[in-house]
């Protein structure tokens, strides 16, 4: 998917497998109870998004801006976070195993 610009979207109780999202903007979108398997978010933006009760496996966030987003009660397995910006995000009860976090700019993350 390229140049997708959803706003106030509800993506819940879903499974994404082998998907690459490039140059997309998600504003006020909810991804509750989703499972992402080998999903790559590249050069994208998330603002005021909700990633609660999410499971991600063998996935990637790269060159992505994540702002005012909640990530709660979620699990990341072998997820790569590379060259991202996290601004005013909330991480609560997040478990990350075998994941790589590098070149991340954190601002007001709790």
Image: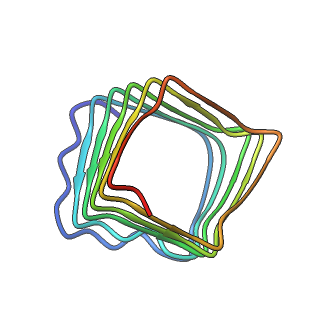
Task: Give the quadrant of the N terminus.
Answer: top left
Q: As drawn, is 80 to the left or to the right of 19?
A: right
Question: Can you say whether 33 is above or below 47 in the image?
Answer: below
Residue displayed at 32% across by 64% down = 49
Q: As drawn, is 62 to the left or to the right of 18?
A: left
Which of the 4 quarters of the picture holds residue 59?
A: top right
**Coloration mode:** rainbow
Question: Can you say whether 71 is above or below 26 in the image?
Answer: below
Where does the image place residue 74, in percent across and percent down from the top left? 64, 68
Q: How many marks?
A: 0
Where does the image place residue 48, in percent across and percent down from the top left? 25, 64
Task: Give the quadrant of the C terminus.
Answer: bottom left
Where does the image place residue 56, in percent across and percent down from the top left? 67, 53
Residue displayed at 26% across by 68% down = 9
Question: Can you say whether 45 is above or below 51 in the image?
Answer: above
Camera-side residue of 63 and 106: 106
Q: As drawn, is 71 to the left or to the right of 76?
A: left
Residue displayed at 61% across by 67% down = 54
Q: As drawn, is 45 to the left or to the right of 1?
A: left
């Amino acid at each position: 998917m390229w140049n997708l610009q959803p706003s106030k979207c509800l993506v819940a109780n879903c499974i994404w497998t082998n998907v690459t999202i490039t140059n997309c903007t998600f504003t006020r979108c909810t991804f509750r109870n989703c499972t992402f398997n080998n999903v790559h978010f590249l050069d994208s933006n998330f603002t005021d998004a909700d990633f609660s009760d999410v499971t991600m496996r063998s996935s990637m966030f790269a060159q992505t801006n994540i702002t005012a987003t909640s990530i709660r009660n979620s699990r990341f397995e072998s997820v790569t976070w590379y060259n991202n910006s996290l601004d005013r995000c909330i991480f609560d009860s997040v478990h990350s195993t075998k994941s790589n976090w590098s070149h991340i700019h954190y601002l007001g993350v709790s």
